[in-house]
């Protein structure tokens, strides 16, 4: 019995040993299979579960004005996203979120019903909405801790929290709202430029796409991330403009006031530095706020100073006369008979002047804005040569400005022009269409010794470390007319703003202006309208050595149509305030104190640079502070040692003592200020 038991025991031991051996072989084989044969694939699969490559939040570069003021920046906002498949009760969640994020319950339910692993419930929440969502999540956590009964009603609150969360994003923001809106353009919700400079320089502004490695736990939550270390690499470059925010504001405000006063359909204004081609301001009315671009029509998005061409009317006359003077076919003192207001061109047509004139000098033709006189001046220049001058001024071709959608205008070559009337009317701005930027640059060439500059809108592109990525320098394009001709034209154009000229309303007190008025009939249905006009004034200030070239266009004014009446006052406002801002102060004419019967010497506050102090020593006479800011007044008085009482705010409207009155360092002055309207 014991022998049989021992045999059976040994057999069981052998069987157990065999089984254990087979199990060991199986485990060893499986281990070898997993480690050697399938190891690389499984390791990659495992890493794919807990290690995820995720895109790093891209930050768009800023757009700055020439002083470094931010015109467009990127700010951080919260967006709400969710995993629909992991939400236990979508109806309840939709109801709870509706009032918190300003969406209807049906809209949220529709979003959460999509067959996707991830959906955006709402992008770019307001701070109040983000706080409401955070409060809702805290409320759900409290419910999860109190009892399990809420799980029966609306599912597990924890699951809702894990499947719905706030995600930080970058949103484009324009701190000055509509200021330069058509020039800056705007971005879509993903931060990609769609219009204006945002689109033109998108490759520089848009942050560089980079992915970081995140380590996740079993529920998919990030526990370790390298996003912060890589964040600086995703930031786009900054764009520095030639614009000045203050000059742009001055220009936009003056233009808007002019459009409102004359109940016009719109308006354009461009301010340029003649010697460099830098665009200091480019305004239009109506404009739009890029923060809310979806509230405007596509017509508002256009930068009309660059994309829309129009007939320049009488402003074109200065280029015809400049060509004739440079070609040597006329002199400024030459006299031409203007036909007493009527000039027949063969059998093809008749040219009229607004006022009948007899003989006028070439200078007076511009001063009085005679169509007939300008036509006769232009007829003295051969068609091919006149074509060359007009094309050298930049008409009929793009200026090369770094901006999308620039129009080249329309210029018909005179050399092959068959119609005599068409050949003549071009001389005074009919039958040719140009853009505001073309007109501004051609005008500026006369204030720059006859040299046409390429317009500059962007100074440089810099990275986040302040290093220059690309720089744009002033670029002379060609010598259009000789310096002598340019000086003659400045003298002729100055007569336009003097007594008897058509542009006297354009002159700010204390400055001189070389300009030209224009009134252009608009084409409606292929015919010139007798009720719709563009009123224009173009000019440079000061007339002797221009600092600014300014173009003002008022579209379809009502009540008056002439550029000297409608557009000239807008020019005057822009010129006066911009010159003072840049540090070029007006000259105060000599005055006589009636009490002392003593002639007071001229107090010249003109300076050459914005950073130069207008007063460098003790004052002997009281300057005229009319229109200056508190800061400008205090700078002048501080340098002179005077004591001053200030009343109000804004710009100076009155003062005691009066301008020109003798003063001493012990004098006390009172200056009243009033906010600008």
Image (spheres, helix red, strand yellow):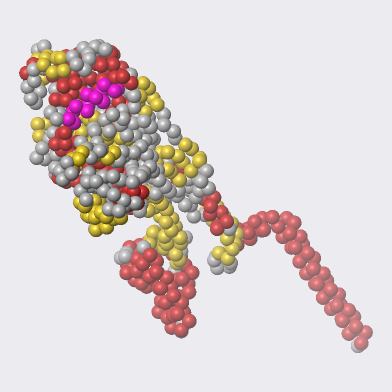
Nearer to me, 90 or 214: 214
Nearer to me, 107 or 543: 543
The residue under the point 42% across, 62% down is 78
Q: Does residue 273 appear left or right of residue 142 in this picture?
A: left
What type of secondary structure mainly makes up the magenta span?
helix
Nearer to me, 228 or 294: 228
Q: Does residue 93 appear left or right of residue 543 in this picture?
A: right
The segment highlighted magenta reads 486-498
* Residue 496 counted in the magenta span: yes
Looking at the picture, how far across and down is residue 643, in whole percent? 30, 55
* Residue 185 counted in the magenta span: no
When the figure is inspected, residue 576 is found, relative to residue 372, above or below; the finding is below
Instruction: Classify residue 675 by image quadrant.
Output: bottom left
Looking at the picture, how far across and down is residue 383, in whole percent? 25, 13
When the figure is inspected, residue 128 is found, relative to residue 143, above or below; the finding is above
When the figure is inspected, residue 129 is found, relative to residue 416, above or below; the finding is below
The residue under the point 35% across, 53% down is 175
Nearer to me, 38 or 157: 157
Q: Does residue 164 appear left or right of residue 183 in this picture?
A: right
Tell me, yes or no, if residue 417 can be seen here: no
Tell me, yes or no, if residue 600 can be seen here: yes
């Amino acid at each position: 019995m014991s022998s049989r038991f021992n045999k059976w025991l040994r057999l069981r031991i052998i069987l157990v040993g065999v089984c254990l051996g087979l199990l060991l072989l199986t485990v060893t084989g499986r281990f070898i299979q997993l480690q050697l044969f399938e190891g690389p694939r499984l390791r990659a699969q495992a890493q794919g579960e807990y290690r995820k490559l995720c895109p790093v939040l891209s930050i768009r570069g800023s757009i700055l004005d020439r002083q470094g003021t931010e015109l467009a920046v990127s700010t951080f906002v919260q967006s709400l996203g969710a995993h629909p498949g992991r939400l236990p009760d979508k109806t309840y969640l939709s109801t709870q979120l509706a009032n918190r994020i300003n969406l209807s319950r049906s809209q949220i339910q529709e979003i959460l019903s999509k067959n996707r692993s991830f959906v955006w419930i709402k992008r770019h929440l307001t701070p109040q909405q983000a706080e409401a969502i955070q409060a809702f999540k805290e409320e759900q956590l409290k419910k999860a801790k109190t009892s399990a009964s809420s799980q029966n009603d609306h599912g597990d609150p924890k699951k809702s929290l894990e499947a719905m969360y706030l995600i930080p994003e970058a949103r484009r923001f324009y701190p000055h709202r509509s200021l330069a809106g058509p020039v800056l353009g705007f971005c879509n919700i993903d931060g990609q430029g769609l219009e204006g400079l945002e689109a033109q320089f998108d490759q520089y502004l848009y942050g560089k796409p980079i992915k970081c490695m995140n380590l996740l736990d079993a529920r998919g939550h990030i526990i370790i991330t390298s996003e912060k270390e890589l964040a600086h690499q995703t930031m786009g470059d900054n764009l520095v403009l030639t614009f000045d925010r203050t000059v742009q504001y001055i220009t936009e405000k003056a233009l808007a006031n002019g459009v409102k006063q004359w109940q016009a359909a719109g308006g354009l204004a461009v301010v340029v530095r003649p010697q460099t081609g830098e665009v200091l301001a480019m305004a239009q009315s109506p404009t739009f706020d890029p923060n809310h671009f979806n509230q405007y029509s596509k017509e508002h998005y256009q930068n009309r100073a660059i994309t829309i061409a129009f007939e320049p009317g009488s402003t074109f006359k200065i280029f015809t006369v400049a060509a004739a003077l440079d070609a040597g076919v006329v002199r400024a003192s030459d006299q031409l008979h203007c036909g007493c207001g009527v000039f027949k061109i063969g059998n093809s047509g008749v040219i009229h002047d607004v006022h009948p004139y007899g003989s006028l000098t070439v200078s007076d033709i511009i001063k009085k804005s005679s169509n007939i006189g300008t036509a006769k001046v232009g007829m003295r220049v051969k068609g091919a040569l006149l074509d060359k001058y007009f094309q050298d001024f930049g008409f009929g071709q793009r200026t090369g400005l770094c901006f999308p959608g620039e129009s080249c205008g329309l210029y018909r070559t005179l050399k092959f022009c068959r119609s005599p009337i068409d050949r003549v009317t071009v001389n005074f701005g009919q039958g040719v269409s140009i853009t505001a930027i073309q007109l501004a640059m051609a005008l500026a060439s006369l204030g720059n010794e006859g040299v046409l500059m390429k317009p500059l809108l962007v100074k440089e592109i810099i990275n986040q470390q302040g290093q220059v990525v690309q720089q744009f320098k002033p670029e002379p394009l060609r010598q259009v007319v000789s310096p002598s001709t340019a000086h003659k034209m400045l003298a002729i154009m100055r007569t336009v703003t003097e007594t008897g000229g058509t542009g006297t309303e354009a002159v700010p007190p204390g400055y001189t202006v070389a300009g030209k008025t224009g009134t252009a009939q608009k084409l409606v249905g292929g015919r010139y309208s007798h009720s719709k006009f563009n009123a224009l004034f173009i000019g440079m200030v000061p007339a002797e050595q221009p600092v600014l070239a300014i173009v003002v266009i008022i579209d379809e004014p009502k009540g008056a149509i002439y550029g000297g009446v409608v557009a000239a006052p807008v020019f005057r406002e822009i010129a006066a305030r911009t010159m003072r801002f840049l540090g070029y102060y007006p000259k105060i004419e000599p005055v006589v104190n009636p009490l002392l019967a003593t002639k007071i010497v001229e107090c010249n506050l003109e300076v050459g640079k914005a950073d130069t102090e207008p007063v460098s020593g003790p004052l002997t006479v009281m300057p005229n502070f009319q229109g200056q800011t508190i800061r400008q007044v205090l700078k002048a008085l501080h340098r002179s040692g005077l004591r001053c009482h200030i009343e109000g705010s804004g710009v100076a409207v009155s003062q005691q003592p009066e301008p020109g009155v003798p003063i001493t360092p012990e004098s006390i002055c009172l200056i009243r200020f009033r906010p600008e309207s």
